[in-house]
Amino acid sequence: MITTKPFFILAIMLLLYSCQEEIKTQPVQVIPEPLSIQTEDQPAFVFKEKTTIVINDSTMLPAVSLLQEILHKELAVVWDKNSQPKSAVVFEYDAGLDSLSQEGYQLQITKNEIGIRSAGPQGLFYAVQTLRQLLPEELEAETLQQLAVPAANIIDSPRFGWRGVHLDVSRHFMPLDFVKEYIDYLAMHKLNVFHWHLVDGIGWRIEIKSHPELTDIGAWRVVKEGKKPWQDFEVWKTGDSRPKYGGYYTQQEIKELVAYAKERQITVLPEIELPGHSEVVMQCYPDLLCKDKHGKSLKNIGVYCASNQDSYQLLEDVLDEVLELFPSEYIHIGGDEVGKSNWKACAQCQATMKKNGYTPHELQSHFVNHFDEYLKSKGRKLIGWHEILEGELSPSATIMYWGGEAGVTASLEKGHPMVLTTGSILYFDHYQSLSQNEPKAFGGYAPLKKVYNYEPVPAEANAETRARILGVQANLWTEYMPDENQVEYMLFPRIAALSEIAWQAPNKKDWTQFRNKMDRMVERYNAMGVNYAPSAYRPEIKFQLDQESKKLNVELETELHADIYYTLDGSEPDQQTATHYTQAFTLDQSTPVKAIAVKDGNKMVSTETKDAILHKACGADVTLDSEPYGNYKAQGGYTLVDADFGGDKWGNGKWLGILGRDFSATINLKETASISKVAMSCIEETGAGIYFPAGMEVAVSTDGKNFKTLKTWKNKREASIPKTPDIKTETFTLDFEPTECQYIRVKAPYQRVKNQGVFIFIDEVIVE
């Protein structure tokens, strides 16, 4: 018996060693990236049944609750560090970490202890969120048996104090349970402001007890078949037999949500629109509309009468109840896109402007400044969209800027604190890829990499203006987000890029590193059951014409890691028969390019297709007789002959946009050629003022001076073309007998629409 004892001990040691080897830990990767990460070559900390949480202050409890929630374990909590067990998570306040701010923290992980230190409860909470990412993603699906955290020392602090995400619940109402989930998503990514867009032109979503009509009537709209929610908007009233849509949050639900957010270190910022975007209010209270000199109400354009005391009284009543529900420092009053036509026609408003020497813009400031003073009297601050800068805005007001990057510096120089929600990048209702497989979105193009690479602080801004930037925020307007699944689709994975912008120290961003981190973050989203957009896996098929060889260079790329397979014969690509893409290639003839992305053996997205069309005008010289408008210049005339079609996204920089004038361009083939067909590729979205051309004319010349018209065509459309957000693409073609020429002039008159500017958008002129 004695001789077997060493073998028994050896067997036990081998068993313990093998168990230690099976401990699964994650590489130390965190989104958003901390200030510093130092990994330690030591054994991991393993959560055990007897692991204890040690605290010494009740304000630590939100962080404790989060830890137990993500671990799916009810670990014992003790208040006496002196009785600390061998395996413990220890929370401590440390005034010496003040330089990291109340949201900064230090996280030290050893074999026996996880030490979490901060100057404030927010920092403890964010340290736990970091700890979450150091645990395997199976944790989210509760399928992990052993919880181990690699040894490390992490120091962290956010760049901006305001790190926000907005959600519009006016256009499409979202259930309270989902709004709570939304709060959790923000907290997970260390974001701290939830901008709740409760009120807009087509829906009032907050219970106001002093004015119950706002929800009895204003929370419901008539559903009209074939029309978008904002088209021909009409409130639904009791007794109407037509279908209705809507909903609102009771004050009790709002209190519950605000408390829920507070536990997750998130401030809820309510938005109550004024003086515009209020069509629904005017339908509830038509007496608030402006009136002409005969006392007749003017058309409802969603703008309060700025000279009617009842307008001010209603909004003061509303704000009084809002202030009771929301303890936020700021109250958002909207203030954007205020149509002033009614004020110009209103007898009372005209009198007010004359008496005070106001312009319409200054009348708007009069309205906004009234509520700035009102909120200040209640101990709060006003924030509004940057249009409130029109006129003479109160110096104490704060701005939320949604314009383009070029306008940031000028707005900062107005002297107001500012939150940047730059529309070309941080509007998450914009498309995430150029693919035609993307669901309908509002417009614009803000893919993951573009969001990640955004630097909010202008390089030319001096220290004084930089100090006015409170932070950044992404906005989700729900015109095309009818339910929570689509909201998640548009939010994820871009929320991860936003968190890096908002948190990470400047000049330390690294797209390659972020891309690698996203591999694991996407796995976490999968485990959580999040309906994230696969857009970053859609192969982008890029064409670039070689002007000398007239061949087309083709590159295939995905934003996030995936293998790409492609075909050139029109067949559907798969892993077995398609070509595995490893490098760019060239085409010397027209053919469809089809591509898929595969990750871990799984096809990530639908097949992407882009037709390569090499025609006689490719690389030709082009003279534009009609100047493109604003940002829709693409590559100038070369856009028309670069063989790179714009697809169905007119805002992607590949289309020429001509506003309010006929299109005309002359193509120089550089040598005489026989042609028999000219086609023009166009796009239409009438709701955005973009219409197909009213016709087309092709003329040719051998000397560039004397042109002969070969063929004309007139677009025979109905007299009244419906305005819709539907996008259509079409190639208009004129065929004729083979003709020798060097120069081709293509003209296309724009569609005349009464009282409206009209665009023609063209991306290629094809010559065969």
Image (cartoon, helix red, strand yellow):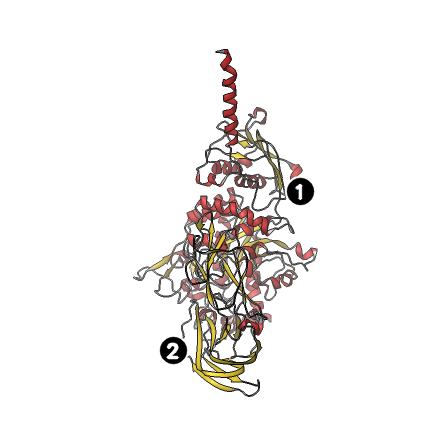
Q: Residue 108, how many percent across, how many down?
A: 60, 35
Q: Residue 52, how many percent across, how many down?
A: 52, 29
Question: What secondary structure is marked by label 2?
Answer: loop
Give the crowd class for mark 1: few <14, some 14-19, many >=20 residues within 10 Å.
few
| Frontmost residue, 670 versus 683 | 670
| Frontmost residue, 363 versus 623 | 623
Mark 1 highlights which residue? 99
Task: Inspect the image, locate mark 1, and give the three-letter code of the amino acid beneath it.
Answer: Ser
* Residue 350 seen in this snapshot: no
Q: Residue at the spot x=64%, y=51% of the render?
A: 506
Asked if marks 1 and 2 touch (Cβ < 8 Å), the reply is no
Up the image or down, 72 lies above or below 364; here it is above
Say left or right for 92 vs 440: right
Q: Earlier in the sequence, mark 1 or mark 2?
A: 1
Say left or right for 377 vs 578: right
| Frontmost residue, 400 versus 431 | 431
Question: What secondary structure is marked by label 1?
Answer: helix
Farthest residue to the top: give it.
2
Inter-mark Cα distance, 1 to 2? 68 Å
| Frontmost residue, 433 versus 99 | 433
Q: Residue 180, how many percent across, how many down?
A: 45, 46
Q: Residue 511, how many percent across, how many down?
A: 59, 52
Task: Inspect the image, locate mark 2, and give the three-letter code of the amino acid beneath it.
Answer: Glu
Of labels 1 and 2, the one closer to you? 2
* Residue 99 seen in this snapshot: yes
Up the image or down, 491 lies above or below 442; here it is above
Farthest residue to the right: give it.
463
Mark 2 highlights which residue? 718
